[in-house]
Amino acid sequence: MTTLKDREKAIIEAGYNTFLLRSREVYIDLLTDSGTSAMSDRQWAGLMMGDEAYAGSRNFYHLEDVIHKYYGYKHLVPTHQGRGAEHIISQIMIKDGDVVPGNMYFTTTKLHQEMAGGKFIDIIIDAAHDPESLYPFKGDVDLNKLQNVIDTYGAEKIPYVSIATTVNMAGGQPISMKNLKEIRELTDNYGIKIIHDMTRVAENAFMIQQKEEGYRDMSVAEITRAICDLTDGATMSAKKDAMVNIGGFLAINDDDIFDEARNMVVIFEGLHTYGGMAGRDMEAMAIGIVESVDDEHMKARVGQVHYLGNKLHEAGVPIVKPAGTHGIFLDAKKFLPHVPQDSFPAQTLAAELYLDSGVRAMERGVVSAGRNKETGEHNYPALELVRLTIPRRVYTQAHMDVIAESVENVFVNRDNIKGLKMIYEPKYLRFFQARFEKL
Ligand SMILES: Cc1ncc(COP(=O)(O)O)c(C=O)c1O
């Protein structure tokens, strides 16, 4: 624990960017659920079974078997984490002038699509941009928007539709199976592929089980497999669902794309049977994937997130509703209505929360959205959010109570909070390293 004086010093040194704090300056760390979950006893035991042969490690083949069984994809290309896979698939599939429709952008995914010459087009339903909408599947695609992109640009300009389960930037919102089936049907009419960002697919499957009619009797494992079966390939950050500290992969059904990806991975990641991971990391991932689709695990994991969401909702704190799966997202526009988006309300709120209690959250608003490639202006997303991300199997209900108390405290004192100005802006993914000063 730190004192207010310690925290004031720390946040100034960090340029009011929670990514630039040191972990020892943080009391409860809700920066991300990425690589921060607790590995199980079995996963730790798996680390001891690492086969560190340069080529053809036993752990690679185990991982491949698990991916075949639980996700169903034909080919596996391991990468050091999710963005390694995004890089490879974008470079292979996207050409200059292509467009990539998707259910809301994700920071690294979109940047890789742009760096490969593509333009991302958001086709998520309008409700996803409305924090008050109670629609349970705010990750759904608006099929009219997708049809419109196809009509405007032509199917030959669309290398794939990019579908995330769940949608991080919308507040961890799931997509429904019904919608996914409809997307499959529409894309099949035009021979367009679906590439699946499956980072939190098991969490999405759990929400389908709980909220979509007709899935109550299916297990999370069965629903996960059904989701994957509707897509042509996937990028995975295994640091989330699969509860490892590092790791990811590209999975793909198409033989030719696989051939190219397997060739390309040796340039940027490592040999195609380790792709930037140690053998022991692949073993822990294989075990984590099996644990991630366990119904009881998922009930506890999402249940804890919803416990925090209910507490904040009952206290009148504006949050994205309904609660998603990997965190609770504060609606900074409603929380700090007197701070204009140019003064970075979500960035400000994350810094204030840290000052109050040492709880570290992160901005998901105008800073994360970056600048428009053509005009150079800030992108102004409808959602200006602070993400309280809950790592898996790490914190207790008592921690959730402390977090809620602190958010409520900041909410009571919100009128005294002023915005920030950006004094240093990196060129790529600026939210990671940007620096700010108090206005
Ligand atoms: C939805 C989503 N896609 C992709 C990624 C990128 O994965 P990684 O951080 O492993 O590179 C993340 C990670 O935050 C994510 O949440």
Image (tube, helix red, strand yellow):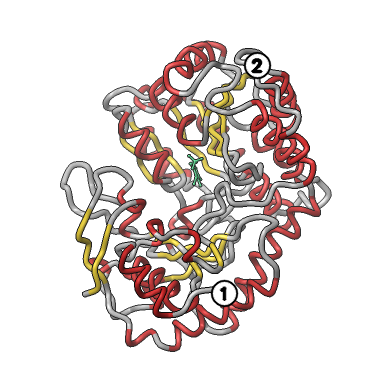
User: From the viewer's perspective, is 397 left or right of 356?
Assistant: right
Q: Quadrant of the N terminus?
A: bottom right
- Residue at the image point whose x is 60% and y is 39% from the top: 238
Residue 15 % position (x, y): 29, 63
Residue 236 % position (x, y): 56, 36
The disc labelled 1 sits on which kind of residue? Ile
> Badge 2 local density, few (<14 within 10 Å), some, or many (20+)?
few
User: From the viewer's perspective, is 238 left or right of 225?
Assistant: left
Give the answer, above or below, for where 414 lies relative to 360: below
- Residue at the image point whose x is 32% and y is 81% from the top: 417
Residue 273 image-quadrant placement:
top right
Residue 241 % position (x, y): 64, 45
- Residue at the image point whose x is 58% and y is 26% from the top: 251
Give the answer, above or below, for where 49 lies relative to 381: above
Q: Is mark 2 within 8 Å of ligand 1?
A: no
Give the answer, above or below, for where 256 lies relative to 241: above
Tag 1 residue: 403
Residue 98 image-quadrant placement:
top left
Residue sitting nearer the eye, 280 or 209: 280
* Helix, strand or loop at mark 2: loop
Tag 2 residue: 53
